[in-house]
Image: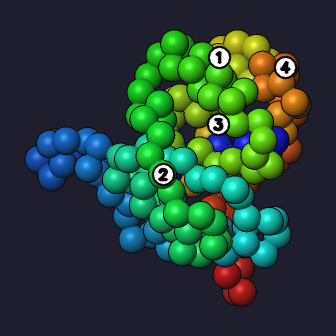
Amino acid sequence: MELYLIRHARAFERDSAAWPDDSKRPLTHQGRARFAGLARRLARTMPAVDLVESSRFTRAWQTALLLENHAEWPAPVRYEALEADGDEILDSMVNALAAMRGLRRLAWVGHEPQLGRLASRLLAGSPDAVSIEFRKGAVLKLVLPGDPRAPASLGWMVTPRFGRSKRS
């Protein structure tokens, strides 16, 4: 299985006056535009995924919708584990991957530090083993063996800068 971990695109800075509930904080115009370019580039360079699961936090959900609209990936569905913290959640996510091994390509759209810790767990067996700079709007491809509990392989990682071209 190929697993694409996607950090939400650039969002507005935290501002408790504007967004008392931080889960409602949206993407900036520039964040949307840059990630839309990356999504179009992904559509040209790789097949669509089978399933997109996302945090329901506004910034992640908007990022997932950009993948639907510009990469023609499936409409996102909510995956609550992408909204939580803690190593126990990572355990449940690894178990979820084991249950979905019939999928060829899966995308999870979420937040840091969870995505980086999950990638480390999948690559090296521990959430603290590998340090990954997961920039806003980055996409990380992991290739999981038949058993997602076995170590994954790093496919590639791109940032919205990859999507910048005159053709995007």
Q: Is residue 10 visible?
A: no
Q: Which quarter shows the N terminus?
A: top right
Q: How far apart are marks 2 and 1 (CA)?
A: 25 Å
For disc 2, the marked residue is 77
SS at mark 2 in the image = strand
Q: Which amino acid does label 2 sit on?
A: Val
SS at mark 4 in the image = loop
For disc 1, the marked residue is 127
Please name whichever residue, 10 or 1, is drawn nearer the observer in this view of the structure. 1
Per the rendering, the mark at residue 162 is none
Please name whichever residue, 7 or 51, is drawn nearer the observer in this view of the structure. 51
Q: Distance between the residues labelled 3 and 1?
A: 14 Å
Please name whichever residue, 56 or 133, is drawn nearer the observer in this view of the structure. 56
**How is colour applied across the structure in the image?**
rainbow
Q: Distance between the residues labelled 4 and 1?
A: 14 Å
Q: Which of marks 4 and 3 is in front?
A: 4
Q: What residue type is labelled 1?
A: Pro
Q: Nearer the viewer, mark 2 or mark 4?
A: 2
Whether residues under marks 3 and 2 lie with C-beta atoms below 8 angstroms apart, the answer is: no
Q: Which residue is drawn at 47% across and 16% down?
A: 86
Count residues near mark 4 (Cα–Cα under 10 Å), then give few for <14, some for 14-19, many for 20+. few
Q: Residue at x 63, y 73 (%)?
A: 72
For disc 3, the marked residue is 133
Whether residues under marks 2 and 1 lie with C-beta atoms below 8 angstroms apart, the answer is: no
Q: Which of marks 3 and 1 is in front?
A: 1
Q: Which residue is drawn at 66% across and 23% down?
A: 94
Per the rendering, the mark at residue 150 is 4
Q: Residue at x 48, y 65 (%)?
A: 65
Count residues near mark 3 (Cα–Cα under 10 Å), then give few for <14, some for 14-19, many for 20+. few
Image quadrant where residue 132 sits? top right
